[in-house]
Amino acid sequence: MTEFTYDLRAVTPDDLPLLESWLRQPHVSAWWGDDVTGSLEEIIEAAEGVDTEPVIVELDGQPIAYLEIYDPHMEDDHPYQDQPFGTLGLDLTIGDPAMIGKGHGAAILAQVSEQLFEEGAPQLIVDPHPDNTGAIRAATKAGFTEVERRAEMEGAVVLMRREAPADLDQPNLDQQDDS
């Protein structure tokens, strides 16, 4: 995978015009839909809430993507509450059309995954639409594997997960001290 380093920062009200322009891009509206106003309201609501962390992903100081990091256990009736406690979900959208097809999706998912695992997340999930082959390919390159296909509130998804590496410094509850 190509090596990039991304900076993540919280979405601010100043980002709304940029996000609106991205939501109007054909490669984004194909998955977000045509209700740009409603999508912007969802992003604002996420920024004001506690269950989702909406961030702008920057490369060399330039915004290129929108990412939501969410905890499905903090949202009432979230369809992924069947996942183990501590699981975090990622929703990534490459906004800048010039950045599509250059490996950024996989690289962002890989970098963010490593950061979240270091912070203690045991498992991460993504849920691209089955027809979004680019997103599925990016998630696969970033180490996610398909769990199952589901029909959710917003349509069909491919639920994919990546588990924290076993070699992270996490407690091993299987070992007993016999001394």
Image (cartoon, rainbow, N blue to C red):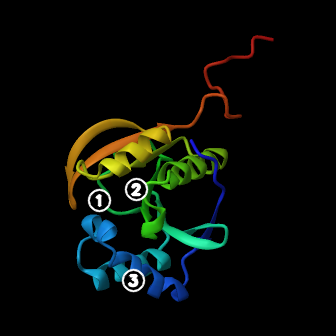
Residue type, mark 2 in image: Pro
Alpha-carbon neighbours of circle 2 within 10 Å: few (<14), some, or many (≥20)? many
According to the picture, the residue beneath numbered tag 2 turns out to be: 72
Q: Is residue 102 above or below residue 123?
A: below
According to the picture, the residue beneath numbered tag 1 turns out to be: 77
Question: Which of the numbered marks, if any, corresponds to residue 20?
Answer: 3
Looking at the image, is mark 3 or mark 1 earlier in the sequence? Answer: 3
Left or right? Give the position of 81 relative to 47: left
Question: Which of the numbered marks, if any, corresponds to residue 19?
Answer: none
On the image, the x and y values in percent for residue 5 come to 66, 56
Q: Secondary structure at mark 3?
A: helix
The answer to the question of whether label 1 and label 2 lie on touching residues, with beta carbons closer than 8 A, is no
Residue beneath the point at 24% across and 80% down: 35
Quadrant location of the C terminus in the rendered image: top right
Label 1 vs label 2: CA separation?
9 Å
Residue beneath the point at 23% across and 41% down: 149
Frontmost of labels 2 and 3 is 3
| Nearer to me, 6 or 77 | 6
Frontmost of labels 3 and 1 is 3
Looking at the image, is mark 1 or mark 2 earlier in the sequence? Answer: 2
Residue type, mark 1 in image: Asp
Label 2 vs label 3: CA separation?
26 Å
